[in-house]
Amino acid sequence: MLATVRFALRQAAESLPNEQTALPMLLSFAATFAGIAAENMSRDGGWLFLEMGRRLERGESMAESLAILLDAPPDRLEPGMALSIELADSVLSYDLRHAGILSPGPVLSMVLADLFNPRSLAFQCAALRACLERLGADDDAETAHQLQREVTNLVGVASNLGEPLRRAAAKLRLLSDRMHRRFVALLPEAHALEENEVRDPVP
């Protein structure tokens, strides 16, 4: 496994001076690493944090991108919907289910609420919740669950989704900060001082 990763990384590094080959090689390395992690990595603490980072990053970037693509009234959504399906790497799945006919309901269901689509926003929240529950972070897991419900409910809105999706991205960033403080920085939670905690200044 290590030899495979090193080989893919070396190929990616060698391709960097050439802009035409750099992106495909970097994507190839990312796919190689993700595949090895998915099939060979034991599901212990290291995998959990790798998985949480993936879900946070994918969820935030998807929410921010969809906020731009879907911020339009229903009669002007078609170009944004087509790009949303491509961004979610779900073109084939959508064509098989809906014969390629773009409609707000099916598109939003696939990119926002489909728990069987590993690129949907709801999938990211559900996977994040499962990781947090394994770590015993029940309050953060509930936050992820609440966000999952919120993005799922957006399927019925189908217009001017920019602001609610930007709020979802902001909530994922806040959750990321909380997880950093809790599991990485190991800092105590911020809180207001009580009167009995306030001391006189040292002269």
Image (tube, rainbow, N blue to C red):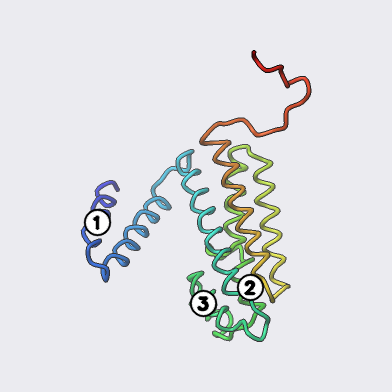
Which callout, 2 or 1, points at the residue further toward the start of the chain? 1
**What residue is at 31 percent from the left and 67 percent from the top?**
24
Residue type at mark 3 is Leu
On the image, the x and y values in percent for residue 152 come to: 68, 64
Circle 3 is placed at which residue position?
A: 83
| Spatial CA span between label 2 and label 3 | 12 Å
For residue 71, above or below residue 49 = below
Q: Secondary structure at mark 3?
A: helix
Name the residue nearer the viewer: 2 or 177.
Answer: 177
Say left or right for 74 vs 176.
Answer: right
Which of 165 and 136 lies nearest the eye of the viewer?
Answer: 165
Residue at which label 2 appears:
108
Instruction: Name the residue type under label 2.
Output: Leu
Q: Position of residue 27 (x, y in %)?
A: 35, 63
> What is the distance, in whole Å, between disc 2 and disc 1 at their CAs?
38 Å
In the shown orientation, is residue 134 left or right of residue 145? left
Q: Quadrant of the C terminus?
A: top right
Q: Which residue is mark 1?
A: 13
